[in-house]
Image (cartoon, rainbow, N blue to C red):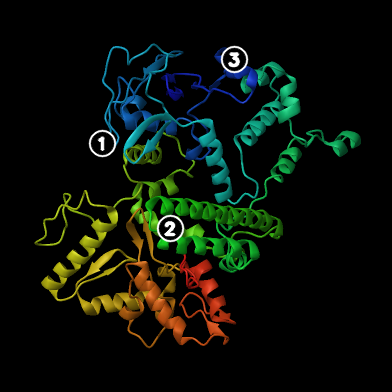
Amino acid sequence: SGHLGYLQSQELTRSHHPPHARCKGHVQEEEQTVHRPSLFPQHPMAEDIESLPLYLNPVLEPLAICLARGLLRDFKTADEVFALEPPPGGYYELVLGTPTIPLYGSQLPEATTDTLKPPGVPSPGTPFFEVMSDKGPTGKILNASWLDVGLAKLGRRGGYDNRISFHDIRAEALVRADENGYSKDELMKFAGHGDPRMFFESYMSATSSVGGVENILGLARRGDISIHFRGLSLRRHPRLWQALPAKVRQEIEDGPECTELNDQINELTVGIQAASMDEQRSKLQDQRQELYKQKHQLMTRELDAWQLRLPKERKPGTTEDEDYTLSYHWTWFERVAHLMPERKRLSTLLPLSVSLRSSEGRQALEDMIAICRQKSPVSDHPALEPVNGCCPARGCSLKVESLPAETRWKHIYRCLKRSLQKQHGFASLCFICRRWFTQEAEFSRHCQDHLARPETIPIQYGFLAVRGMIASPGYCPRRLGDASKSATDRLKPFVDPQSLKKDMDRYYDALEDGEPVHCGSPHCDVLFDSVLELQYHYQDVHCIPVPRKRSNSGER
């Protein structure tokens, strides 16, 4: 059978055999090649990646972009492309044109005879990797700086202490190519280098691939030692904190540098409230914003130092199952996945070792196409979806599709609950199961089942919304663990952060500071020395913010 590949934004290539795919990669890292396009290498990439995971397939993403935007001149679906069978030894070129499918309301460029160019000539105004906004394509290309910044953030989210750069990836690729026995000329062409010294001086690993002991003692040569030692240069913590622990952050807030910034911010806030002229008020607001920026930079530096420290302190041999580090950041996707059905499926499909043409590979391709065409990365809550763009409650025909997400779900939740109560005498939504109940006894039993099996209740109790759409209501941990209350009262959902805060404050006021206090939730019963330590625990583990200290002059 044939093999699919791509030539970046100019053309797709499908050959019979051998597997053949090309990508024009513009290597702009070396100054001598930046202004000489003839030196840019073309990197062959094959659709067949043997038993590697689907997310490593180099054809998956560009094909999804082409199909999502209608860039293929002669084909509209993946089935049409996969059905092509070139003659033995031959190949087909799939020509790209201008987009034919608008992305969420964007305007398509007018089709002219100039929009289709010969292979190798880019189409003006149609970047293949394009910057997107909420209003659609911007016409701007995603550049190398965007990629470098994104890689650094991705690496830190992945648990690596040092920030991963594009240079790191290039260096490892070149070292691997050198170890695989490619000639110096092939290596230079692969890297886009014009000087053979550049690899040795800037890319070659400091870890020698020559095994000194094996070489001297005449032992069998091992080619894997240097790889392991190179890997040690990137330490990883599988549960790296993505924010400062509440106690550490509070200690920084109480430190002299942050205290001084807070005092200045409070003084400016008083000045802004007292300012009588718009110009004066605007000037003070700019000054305050600069102080907020300095405070943010301070916290960022402290977080960076904290994240660098954790992987070094982790005991070697500790598995993820044995790692008891608790941080709510690692469960965010699980809490919002029901608002992102395509991404939820992809989280299970992409790690599979399957081909692009398998049923799983085709489903992944369809999901990526759907994501490319989405205006918002989140959909409506499954239990609060409009019907034909209107509120689903009986007797309400309000068109809610164009309303902001927060306004939309709140209207549907309240209106549908009233409507169901009017019809059945009772209505309540289980946000955990995303299911409406219209029988009070049945709902009570359902809540009791959740409480009897705490593993079915999310351990993060804080209210969570994504782009205005509710993902999970808030739950009070003290209520959840209070056996004197009814099951429905214990599982009472708080559909806004303010109501949850008020309920938590009532519990805090009833606790005696300075006395040991338990967490109280059904998930853990840890004993804390003070209410403040309990509040730190609630924020770090259960995602309920520590109450802010009150200030006479006010805070942001």
Q: Residue 269's x, y, as percent?
A: 46, 62
Crowd around label 2: few <14 · some 14–19 · many ≥20 (10 Å): few
CB atoms at circles 1 and 2 under 8 Å apart? Answer: no
Q: Amino acid at mark 2?
A: Glu
Label 1 and label 2: CA atoms lie apart by 30 Å
Residue that numbered label 3 is attached to: 39
Relative vertical location of residue 38 with respect to residue 211 in this rendering, above or below? above
Question: Along the horizontal axis of the image, is 241 left or right of 113?
Answer: right
Crowd around label 1: few <14 · some 14–19 · many ≥20 (10 Å): few
Residue at point 47%, 50% (across, down): 286
Q: For the view shown, which residue lies furthest in the right direction? A: 216
Mark closer to the chain start, 2 or 3: 3
Q: For the view shown, which residue lies furthest in the left direction? A: 395
Residue at point 60%, 55% (across, down): 298
Q: Quadrant of residue 35?
A: top right
Q: Residue 22's x, y, as percent?
A: 50, 21
Q: Nearer the viewer, mark 2 or mark 3?
A: 3
Q: Is residue 392 visible?
A: yes
Residue that numbered label 2 is attached to: 334
Mark closer to the chain start, 1 or 2: 1
Question: Along the horizontal axis of the image, is 491 left or right of 197?
Answer: left
Residue that numbered label 1 is attached to: 105
